[in-house]
Image (cartoon, helix red, strand yellow):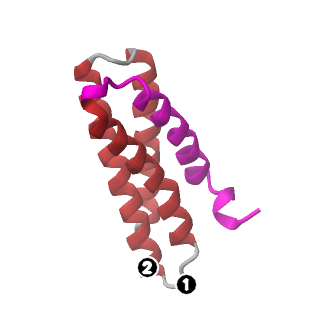
Amino acid sequence: MLYHERLDVYQLSIQFVAAAIAVSERIPRGYASLADQLRRAAMSIPLNIAEGVGKASKAEQARLHAVARGSAMECGAILDVVRVLRVESSDSLDQAKEMVVRIVGMLSKMCR
């Protein structure tokens, strides 16, 4: 097992990717770019966490964790837009948003 795979924030971000993909599949065709953006931003989170953990300098680690945090914030905004479109149940959006909030909190600590 690689080190980043042991991190709670990485494990949660992988779970969020699955949730984001499920949400994106229910976004109407007219909003395909929104669905694509949600998938790309969600995938960016664990990828940047893993890359950051692999860097030798603390500054570079913090920078990549900040990028991951930015992607998580972007996902939060996209979920807000999806809520306005009313294409997903409130419960699943609430669960996805809760994951984002937890991810942002953990990454904020890792950026210090």
Task: Kindly indicate the quadrant of the structure image that contains residue 54.
Answer: bottom right
Q: Quadrant of the C terminus?
A: bottom left
In the rendered structure, which amino acid carries the disc numbered 2?
Answer: Glu
Outermost residue to the right: 1
The image shows residue 14 at horizontal and vertical percentages of 57, 46
Residue 21 lies within the magenta run: yes
Q: CA distance from mark 2 to mark 1?
A: 8 Å
- Element on which disc 1 rests: loop
What residue would you read off at disc 1? 56
State yes or no: discs 2 and 1 in contact (Cβ < 8 Å): yes
Q: Residue at x 36, y 42 (%)?
A: 36
Task: Kindly indicate the quadrant of the structure image that contains residue 56.
Answer: bottom right
The image shows residue 85 at horizontal and vertical percentages of 24, 20
Closer to the camera in the image, 73 or 110: 73
Closer to the camera in the image, 25 or 57: 25
Up/down of 10 relative to 52, above or below: above
- Element on which disc 2 rests: helix
Outermost residue to the bottom: 57
What residue would you read off at disc 2? 60
Please provide the residue range marked out in magenta.
Answer: 1-30
| Category of crowding for the residue at label 2, using alpha-carbon neighbours closer than 10 angstroms: few (below 14), some (14–19), many (at least 20) | some
Q: Quadrant of the N terminus?
A: bottom right
Q: Residue at x 47, y 80 (%)?
A: 58
Outermost residue to the front: 29
Left or right: residue 12 versus residue 105 is right
| Category of crowding for the residue at label 1, using alpha-carbon neighbours closer than 10 angstroms: few (below 14), some (14–19), many (at least 20) | few
Magenta span: predominant SS is helix
The image shows residue 42 at horizontal and vertical percentages of 43, 46
Closer to the camera in the image, 59 or 14: 14
Up/down of 92 relative to 7, above or below: above
The image shows residue 20 at horizontal and vertical percentages of 45, 36
Q: Residue at x 24, y 27 (%)?
A: 30
